[in-house]
Image: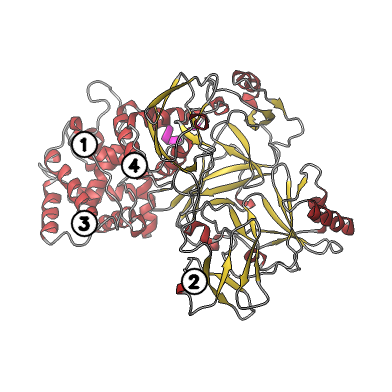
Amino acid sequence: MDYESWNEAIVAHFFAPSMAQTPVYLSVDDDTLRVIAEEQGWSAATAVDDFQAAVRSVVHGPRPFVNPLQDAVRWRSRGSRGTPPFAAVLGATVLAASRMGPREGGGRGAYSYYWPLRQVLDLSGAGTVPSYGDVVPMLWEYLQEWLEAAGGAFGLPTARTRPNMENIGWSLSQAVLRGADRGRLAVFFRAIGAHPHEDIDGMELLLRLREWCKTAGRGGRLAEVAANAEAEWLLADMLHAELLRFDGTARDERGRLCLRVALTSQAGGEPFGLAVQVPPGAALPDVSAWGWQPQAGQWNWLPASWLLGPGLDVDRVVGPLRLLLPSRDCYLFRINDFLGAWASVDDAEAGVEHRILVRTHLADEVPAAAAATDGEAVLARRAVVPQGWVAFARFVPQRSASLPPPLAVLSPRAGRLATLQGGLRVHAHEPVYLTDGPPDVVVPAGGDAKVTVAGEEHLVDPTIEVALQLSGLELPAAAHEITVGPRKMTIRLVDRLRETAPRPMMGHAVHVTATGHGWLDPLPVDLREAASCPARWWSGAAAMSIHDLGETDPVQRALLRVGGEVHVLGSSARRECARIYPAAPRWLEDLGLPPSDVDLEPALVGVPFPVEWVVTVLARSRRVQWVGGARPAPGPAPTRAPDVLTRVRWRQLVTDEQRPATFPAGPDEEARWRAYVDGGL
């Protein structure tokens, strides 16, 4: 392929519309060139040589970069319309940076940039390439201008340099991280408790990245880059910039949304599963063609067929999504009532029970590591685990400890920044709490921690306690700044929560289908402005009824608390049961409230029997609710279609002695449940 073809292909790959408003890196390396060739229908086997030959056709002579500069000047004189003609040339400079490393012979310049650059361009000699310093930094600035002029439609510029590397720093800044690495940064930021758009020193983040890579035995290229002293200033700058842009999600080099995956377990062993947490407000594309459609603001189960087993790296592309779970030698599980199962976590929580799954060669070290945290890990002999793994149960750490990787995950607050925990939070996206329920400030592990709250200093010894309880400070209703080491956080305390509404009651416009079912519009409207359409009053509660003002037969709506595996039961005589996958109603997000509830009726579409009971299976209990009369209705699309289960599963659901039944509606509903169960046994 000629130079123009490669230049167009480079731009199409890196600066695609899918990268809009996303930091974009021109991270060209040998593997990426093969991928680009496959995208274009070219030979991947010869892609690297073909690309280099194409670039050499325009970068040559005693001043090799003068020709690309002349092309760039003509392009700018025409208003910078169309594809930047120098993108492939800049890609070649990044390709050289990706090949930097010690070379044979050592000595001065052994770790050189210009040596691999001369190889890429087939230039003889040694040292600086003539015209490089005059031209290449200028071409990077032209690329920045083009991206900025497009308003971020093709991505946000990221190339940068430093005073001691004015010329080559631009290209080096693009070679440090690659697509999969940047996808894992979101996992890293969440693991250390960093907040979106937070301003934290880059070197502080780099030190924590190095510890994070060690903590769970994470290997691979990201760990190698983090440990590379030659590139540490570049990586530190990138980490700082990436966190400033971080919105709770991350995207790879193709604009795919990267999501964190957790390994799940029913009892610390088999059967294992996979689940992914999607941040509130995330714009999720339609991936139903892959047999799965996640919902924002909640945990979502992945298809069982996607599970490869513990110890294997999960890096799965699902259309415009990328699902990531780094491989580990030690998994730490904590009860996740949103899933009704034990789910893997990045570090321990003091005073909370955990389960441990480790490779056999680490098993002998677990009891001592647990004891260092003032906890105990008991061998789980009944847990069914894969060959080469050992399970431990009843691990309740009490304090932080210095543990070697990969067992450092067993220490509370391992590698994390100070963060907020608990409290009566009343806003889904902002740190707003009731004054009667402020959060605790959990301090980092290691050394005394000085916590400054509203200008007053407090000392916390992490070896004795892991948190400063703000509830004991009697803070007034106001905004309060909290500083712990490099971290600054602001919370707002309010005396009461008031939903923003024009009147004490709210109205929603209602659509009525041919079958007579009604459902709510996603946005609330003032009833005084809704005279032209029918409306129903509503009020929020654990179970919701929506009463039509003009009809005698109200349309029922039931809200279920988020969490666990949701099952519906029909006739006890026929032992009918199915698992359903309800989704949160849109109006919760519209009001800025956490998605703490899900709609029942839309998830009943496809259930082949009249529903009488909902049984939500949690990790340690069952939540049982009578919903007789509930019927399928339109509304928020469930995450997947119902699964009709066997009569054997019905019996397991009603007789599960390991998970005692709880009845939110009280003893009368418990008596009705007993009668229902007796009718089927």
Closer-to-camera residue (500/441): 500
Q: Amino acid at mark 4?
A: Leu
Binning the other alpha carbons within 10 Å of mark 1 as few (below 14), some (14 to 19) or many (20 upward) gives: many
Residue where numbered disc 3 is placed? 149
Mark toward the viewer: 3 or 4: 4
Lower position in the chain sequence, tag 1 or tag 4: 1
Residue where numbered disc 1 is placed? 168
Lower position in the chain sequence, tag 2 or tag 1: 1
Label 1: element kind: loop
Query: How far, Cα to Cα, is label 1 from label 3?
Result: 24 Å
Label 2: element kind: helix
**What range is drawn magenta here?**
218-223
Residue where numbered disc 2 is placed? 527
Residue contact at pointers 1 and 4, CB within 8 angstroms: no
Numbered tag placed on residue 244 in the rendering? 4
Q: Is residue 264 above or below residue 599?
A: above
Q: Amino acid at mark 1?
A: Ile
Can you give x and y, in whole percent of width and height, for residue 51 in the image?
28, 50
Can you give x and y, in whole percent of width and height, for residue 490 in the image?
40, 38
Binning the other alpha carbons within 10 Å of mark 4 as few (below 14), some (14 to 19) or many (20 upward) gives: some
Query: How far, Cα to Cα, is label 3 from label 4?
Result: 21 Å
Picture quadrant of residue 629: bottom right
Query: How far, Cα to Cα, is label 2 from label 1?
Result: 63 Å
Lower position in the chain sequence, tag 1 or tag 3: 3
Query: How far, Cα to Cα, is label 4 from label 2?
Result: 42 Å
Label 3: element kind: helix
Can you give x and y, in whole percent of width and height, for residue 481 in the image?
38, 35
Mark toward the viewer: 1 or 3: 3
- Asked if residue 455 lies in the magenta stretch, the reply is no
Lower position in the chain sequence, tag 3 or tag 4: 3
| Residue for point 29% across, 58% down | 153
Q: Is residue 571 above or below residue 67?
A: below
